[in-house]
Amino acid sequence: MNTRILLRGSIRRRLIIQLLTGAALLASLMFLVVQNYARDLAGQSQDEILSASMTAILDSASVRNGDLTVDIPYFAFSMLGNISEDRVFYAITRNGAFLTGYPDLPKPVASSGIAPRFQTARYDGEEIRMATATRRLSVSGTPDFVEVTVAQTRYGLRQQLAGISQTVAGFGIGFFVIAAVFGILAAQSAIQPLRQLAGSVSRRGLSDLRPVSAPVPAEMESLVGALNGFMSRLKTSLSRSEDLIAEAAHRVRTPLTTVRTQAEITLRRVDKPENRQAVREMIRAIDESSRAAGQLLDHAMVSFRSDHLELEDIELTRLAQDAVSRLRPMAELRDIDLEIHVPNTAMTVKGDPILMQSALLNLLDNAIKYSPPDSCVHVVVRLKADEGEITVRDEGAGFPKADMGRLTRRFVRGGNTDAVVGSGLGLTIANEVARAHGGRLFLTNHSDKGGACASLSFPLA
Ligand SMILES: Nc1ncnc2c1ncn2[C@@H]1O[C@H](COP(=O)(O)OP(=O)(O)OP(=O)(O)O)[C@@H](O)[C@H]1O
Ligand SMILES: [Mg+2]
């Protein structure tokens, strides 16, 4: 029985997505943090050089003969030029009035102290970084405030940052790829125990209901516990059903056999023809009930065992010979000869011996029951392609043509049964056994001599 399993999501996919998302977030975070840090560091170093340049200019300011002179030293700008191709600007004011430099340079932010101030502004269509400081000089006894601003464009800084960003992005991608590979491997190994459990359970034989004893990770303890509990309950219930079938067969057949014996004895004692007829009918009814009970229980046993096939190597020739010798006494009672033809080579199939025996006995039972006395029943075992086949052919009138298509259905009997005791389950049993073993039951009538021909075929082991 194949039940469709409803699937929702995949643990492996979910794990991989979560691990990859985590790795991507970490890589982006690393990129942003390092980029920010690099920007701060580069900005800081530009500020330091701007500050040094500005201080050198401010230091060169002096009062000579009561006049303020600013002698800009060469190195004040050369140290800025060293950084890159950046452009440098400056402006010097005295008491707020422009003295020299670039007059339109943005005004620095006002400050009450003399500490250097830094700001970023736009000038001449470009972004610039400005460093400004004020120095107090005394000219002719009055305080004079000299303010120096040195500014520089930020090409170099941007180039430096672009280089760092590229390197960090490379690192980030590398980190992500490595994390992704580890993530996929981790997801695989996380579900590996589940796969192993599924594999070991599905490799088991159908009747193997032992508890799972292989060690499993702690997270799977409850799953394996539930599985073991389920298998143990199933085992108990299966063995109860098997016992029940055997018990029921015993309980039904035994009293019927006793009643039949009593009826036979009574028949010998009764003389009146009408009483003898009544007892005969009673015996027939008992036979019918006994046969029906036996067949019903056999059919229940076949259905039950077909679900849990206990496969063994079965030699078809041996199987046929056993069945023939079991039914020979019954055949002799009707003066029917049982002939068996077997090949020289052994033919082994995988099957449940009890079920296969039951199927064959039913075919033989039919052949003996439905063929005339003094005839012969032929049992032929032969190899047919990759199948082993057992055919039971009799010399009777054959299967009734009108019923041919329905004879394997439960409780269906043909129009040729008359006084023959039966319950209509024999061919049902044979057909179900064949199907449970991947084989088939064929019913035909012998083309020339007419007799019924029933073949059971099973795939070879
Ligand atoms: N060898 C045969 N020759 C002629 N008819 C047969 C033969 N075997 C089976 N049949 C027909 O097929 C029907 C179904 O057979 P099946 O074995 O299923 O039931 P049954 O023999 O009537 O009862 P039981 O369950 O006791 O075997 C029979 O009732 C009979 O009509
Ligand atoms: Mg039968």
Image (cartoon, rainbow, N blue to C red):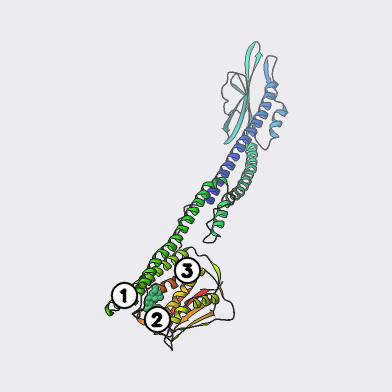
- Which type of secondary structure does the marked residue at label 2 adopt? helix
- Residue found at the far top of this picture: 141
Disc 3 secondary structure class: helix
Disc 3: which residue: 436
Q: Is residue 153 above or below residue 430?
A: above
* Residue in front for this viewpoint, 426 or 88: 426
Measure the C-alpha gap from mark 3 to mark 1.
42 Å
Image quadrant, ligand 1: bottom left
Ligand 1 lies under 8 Å from the Cβ of mark 2:
yes
Dot 2 alpha-carbon crowd within 10 angstroms: few under 14, some 14 to 19, many 20 or more: many
Going by the image, does 220 lie left or right of 301?
Answer: right
**Along the viewing direction, whichever of 10 and 169 lies nearer the viewer:** 10
The circle on residue 279 is: 1
Please indicate, yes or no, whether residue 3 appears anywhere in the rendered image.
no
Q: Which residue is mark 2?
A: 370
Query: In the image, is residue 336 above or below residue 297?
Result: below
Q: Say if mark 2 contacts mark 1, CB within 8 Å.
A: no
Disc 2 versus disc 3: nearer the observer: 2
Q: Quadrant of the C terminus?
A: bottom right
Q: Residues within 10 Å of mark 1 (few under 14, many from 20)?
A: some
- The reply to whether discs 3 and 1 touch (Cβ–Cβ < 8 Å) is no
Alpha carbon separation for disc pair 2 and 1: 24 Å
Residue closest to the eye, 268 or 242: 268
Q: Secondary structure at mark 1?
A: helix
Looking at the image, tell me whether mark 3 or mark 1 is earlier in sequence order: 1
Position of 290 compared to 154: left or right? left
Rounded to the nearest whole Å, what is the CA distance between mark 2 and mark 3?
A: 27 Å
Hey, what amino acid is under mark 1? Val
- The image quadrant of residue 35 is top right
